[in-house]
Image: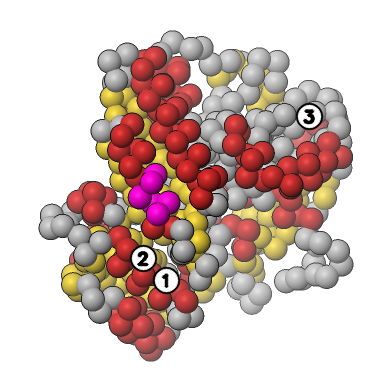
Amino acid sequence: MKAVHDLWPRGVISRRAGAPAAEVEVRRPATYEEVASLLRSGTRMIPFGGLSGVVGAVAPDAGQVALDLGGFDRILAIDEVELTVHVQAGVRGLDLEQALNARGLTLGHHPSSLPVATVGGLISTRSSGQESTRHGSIEDMVLGLTVALPDGTLARPRPGPRSAVGPALHQLLVGAEGGLGVVLDAVLRVHRQPEAVEGRGWLFADVEAGLAAVREIVQSGVRPLVLRLYDPEDTQFQGIAEPGCLLVAATAGEPEVARAEAAVVARAAAAARDLGPEPWERWRRHRYDLSAERMLDMLEPPGAYLDTIEIAAGWRILPEVYREVKSALTAGSSLALCHFSHAYPQGCCAYFTFAGSSTDEEQALAAYDRCWAETMRICLARGATISHHHGVGQARAAWARQELDGWWPVWEKVRAALDPGGVMNPKAVGGR
């Protein structure tokens, strides 16, 4: 028996304040059939991998069983002809990436949690990575899944790069947070590593000018490897002392393609000051430094609170959503930063970090909750999504129904049909 939980900052603060974490039975199955048998027992199962999530989706209660998928740690096959990898759910993202790199390949999926996150966790949270503008997010990489359904049935990957034999039902599990079944392994698209990468930084006068350049770049048809814009406060954290907004961009591919796309990026950034390659090199060296696990060190002092909130909005409303959320976070905390990444022709993700300190734990939790509630209120009122890639869990449970709106009954019906006995994670996507 032991406590099992992810890295949700509110949970960390509550435990720091003295709230006990439930101790539960932990099972580490060795075979898929053992998972199926455990599910057929009817006991509530909470699957987990690297426990790097940040929304409280993994937090089993007393009487439930935590299902440790770390034993499924094999890369089953790498196909260099078809550019696929068949990998078990317990393989850590960085281990997979290094194995692919040894063959001149890459998954192209680089969340900051990559050193600790598992493939199953990335799929279950509908993860997005730092190179998503080029390679897409995890749902774009998943070709098929092996899943243990709540009744113990095993569903295995369908063949081929695409099928029109009905909907792609495996996508139901991508982002389901362990609420519909247990992801056991996946067939994923991979890419050849680029021959060349061209990266550099630019300093824009303000957020609006930077966002306009980012929109121009992605709407031109160019798909940069990395495209990240930092607001003035976050620019300071990137080592740029002068005022302005830092854009870090990199293009990749065959050398002539990388250079040609870099020229398109430079043309869109013509109004900004060219800072050369150093901002890109610095970012690349430190790309995993701000993982959730490391940020927990900042939550050790009593009264401290800190978290990140990633949202997304269309280009028309994004600047105003940014200003309103930034204002709300600044009013409720002593530190508020934002960077923009994961850009699409239709819009972009805004990733906020906020932190502060209160005189006691009760006030810290109240301040923390106000920051979250105000951000969710603004997003829902403006038409922005309340989560781009961290998921729902407990952090966003109160607002999930409002965003899903008419699709909420669909989610409930799917969940009831697949899991009528309530075997799977009750804290997944809005709770149960």
Q: Badge 1 local density, few (<14 within 10 Å), some, or many (20+)?
A: some
Where is residue 202? Give x, y as percent.
24, 69
Mark 2–mark 1 CB contact (< 8 Å) = yes
Residue at which label 3 appears = 423
User: Dot 2: what SS?
Assistant: helix
Residue at which label 1 appears = 215
> The disc labelled 1 sits on which kind of residue?
Arg
Residue placed at 41% from the left, 21% from the top?
Answer: 365
Real-space Cα distance between discs 3 and 1? 44 Å
Real-space Cα distance between discs 3 and 2? 45 Å
Q: In this view of the protein, can residue 105 be seen by the observer?
A: no
Identify the magenta region: 320-325
Task: State which tag comes first along the sequence, 3 or 2.
Answer: 2
Give whichever of 175, 288 is nearer the camera.
175
Q: Tell me if 319 is positioned left or right of 40 in this view.
A: left
User: Dot 1: what SS?
Assistant: helix
> The disc labelled 2 sits on which kind of residue?
Leu
* Circle 3 or circle 1, nearest the eye: 1
> The disc labelled 3 sits on which kind of residue?
Val
Residue at which label 2 appears = 211
